[in-house]
Image: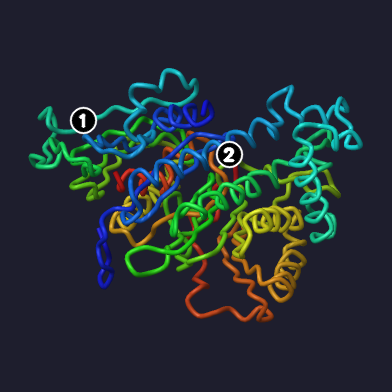
């Protein structure tokens, strides 16, 4: 079960649940007691479920649905039972909007455009769940539908976080050894073109996938979505890369992007110099008509 | 406390998996990995997997020493497991996984779409799916970041294979 040189502490403990329209997996080293793991998983999954009830745009009576159709005004949030949570997410959406130069716009999602903070909520909720886990577990890997938060490691090493290859189902582009970090990926491979460019009102198509690595999953998730949105068409990809490069220099959130032809770029604040081992040859011909083609 | 109970219940029956693994008498919270067969009917739109694990003797897998474990530690699964036929962007895919001692040791593609563009992509993607899933089974990857998957997408994801291999 363990690669060469890695001691075998036994398989990590794991739990899986279905929430927020996706699947959330939790893993921890076997050194974590079964009872402690179970209690931590229960609490973290329960938190995600509660956030889903508050923020789901698919539940007609959720507070977010009522904000979207005007039944709940943001001015009334201070008196609302979930006011503090809603206010926190609204502030996150405003920050992501400002940081991304308007590319992340929770108020212009879909057709017709409306308020939908989904692009921020999953990462934010997972970060909250990870905070709860961190109080109980010295090491864990939480995967919220593809957005990952790790703490510590196992088997004497860091967690090894794979980044999916959008053109090769089941394949990985890179494996990142990380101990305390968030890895968020936005892309078209699973749900098609679902990131909207607020300027054009059309789905963004310039990049197939963006992965952002940094300390906070809420921001990493938002930045990944924002970069997808900035790359509305192939002509905008350079702009999206420049923005990610600046983000890495300024805030330390570095990224990997994949375009529809399978080209991979690493943006790490080093002015576009690819680090050894992270770039690869152009994808085989079959991949160029991959998920984005259809 | 009610939320906790609900979380546990859902942990046990969330989604059907591409690779269902019998977890023996393991003491961990049960994931979809074993609850799928029993509970798939309660989740419309989620395909149901079938399981051919030993000891029912229907597979050529070696006799599993682990399938009758009664310890409180998670029992390592052994057997051959047939996943549900999953519609993917590349056509319909069904795989058979061989798990020994909780480790994914082989993956066989049972079914794939024929004709046109999907066929061309399958010819490339499926061998990769197989080799990468095996690489994951050897534990070089602990967790996978990718575009947000649906429940059905999870079933055919590398993360699902990793979760299965941990049972």
A272 up-or-down from B96: above or below: below
Does residue A289 appear anywhere in the picture?
no
Which residue is rendered at x = 53% and y = 52% of the image? B146
Q: Out of B112 and A10, give the one closest to the viewer.
A: A10
The chain that hosts pointer 1 is B
Q: Out of B60 and A16, give the one closest to the viewer.
A: A16
The chain that hosts pointer 2 is A
- Please rate how many residues cluster around mark 2, counting C-alpha atoms within 10 Å: few if below 14, some from 14 to 19, many from 20: many
Left or right placement of residue A267 versus residue B48 in this view: right
Left or right placement of residue A170 versus residue A1 in this view: right
Q: Name the residue beneath numbered marker 1.
A: B52
Q: Quadrant of residue A81?
A: top right
- Please rate how many residues cluster around mark 1, counting C-alpha atoms within 10 Å: few if below 14, some from 14 to 19, many from 20: many
Q: Position of residue A68 (x, y in %)?
A: 82, 31
Q: Position of residue A60 (x, y in %)?
A: 73, 22
A58 up-or-down from B159: above or below: above
Q: How many marks?
A: 2
Nearest to the eye among marks 2 and 1: give it.
2
Which residue is rendered at x = 83% and y = 37% of the image? A113
B56 up-or-down from A123: above or below: above
Q: Name the residue beneath numbered marker 2.
A: A48
Q: Out of A165 and A152, give the one closest to the viewer.
A: A152
Q: Residue furthest top?
A: B41
Q: Out of A228 and A115, give the one closest to the viewer.
A: A115
Which residue is rendered at x = 55% and y = 79% of the image? A275
Instruction: Judge if badges 2 and 1 mark residues of a common chain.
Output: no
Quarter of the figure with the C terminus of chain B = top left
């Amino acid at each position: 079960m363990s690669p060469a040189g890695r001691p075998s502490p036994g398989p990590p403990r794991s739990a899986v649940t279905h929430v927020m329209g996706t699947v959330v997996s939790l893993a921890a080293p076997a050194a974590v007691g079964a009872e402690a793991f179970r209690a931590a998983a229960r609490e973290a999954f329960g938190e995600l479920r509660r956030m889903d009830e508050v923020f789901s745009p698919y539940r007609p009576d959720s507070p977010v649905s009522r904000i979207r159709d005007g039944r709940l005004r943001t001015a009334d949030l201070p008196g609302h039972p979930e006011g503090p949570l809603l206010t926190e997410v609204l502030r996150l959406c405003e920050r992501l909007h400002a940081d991304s130069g308007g590319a992340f716009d929770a108020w212009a999602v879909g057709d017709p455009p409306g308020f939908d903070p989904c692009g921020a909520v999953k990462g934010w909720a997972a970060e909250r769940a990870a905070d709860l886990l961190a109080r109980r577990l010295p090491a864990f890997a939480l995967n919220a539908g593809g957005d990952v938060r790790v703490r510590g490691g196992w088997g004497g090493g860091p967690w090894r976080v794979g980044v999916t290859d959008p053109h090769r189902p089941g394949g990985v582009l890179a494996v990142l050894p990380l101990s305390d970090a968030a890895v968020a990926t936005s892309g078209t491979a699973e749900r098609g073109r679902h990131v909207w460019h607020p300027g054009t009102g059309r789905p963004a198509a310039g990049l197939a996938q963006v992965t952002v690595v940094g300390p906070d999953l809420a921001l990493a998730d938002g930045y990944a979505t924002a970069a997808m949105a900035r790359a509305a068409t192939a002509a905008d990809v350079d702009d999206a890369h420049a923005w990610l490069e600046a983000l890495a220099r300024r805030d330390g959130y570095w990224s990997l992007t994949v375009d529809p032809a399978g080209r991979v770029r690493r943006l790490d604040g080093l002015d576009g110099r690819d680090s050894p081992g992270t770039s690869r040859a152009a994808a085989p011909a079959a991949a160029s008509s991959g998920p984005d083609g259809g | 406390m009610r939320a906790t109970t609900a979380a546990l219940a859902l942990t046990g029956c969330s989604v059907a998996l591409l690779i269902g693994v019998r977890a023996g008498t393991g003491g961990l919270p049960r994931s979809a990995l074993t609850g799928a067969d029993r509970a798939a009917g309660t989740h419309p739109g989620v395909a149901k997997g079938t399981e051919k694990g030993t000891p029912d003797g229907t597979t050529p897998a070696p006799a599993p020493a682990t399938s009758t474990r009664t310890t409180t530690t998670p029992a390592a699964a052994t057997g051959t497991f047939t996943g549900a036929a999953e519609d993917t962007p590349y056509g319909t895919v069904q795989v058979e996984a061989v798990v020994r001692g909780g480790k994914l040791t082989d993956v066989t593609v049972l079914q794939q779409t024929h004709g046109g563009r999907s066929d061309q992509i399958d010819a490339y993607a499926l061998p990769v799916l197989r080799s990468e899933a095996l690489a994951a089974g050897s534990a070089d990857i602990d967790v996978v970041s990718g575009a947000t998957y649906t429940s059905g997408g999870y079933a055919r994801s590398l993360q699902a294979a990793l979760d299965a291999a941990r049972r």
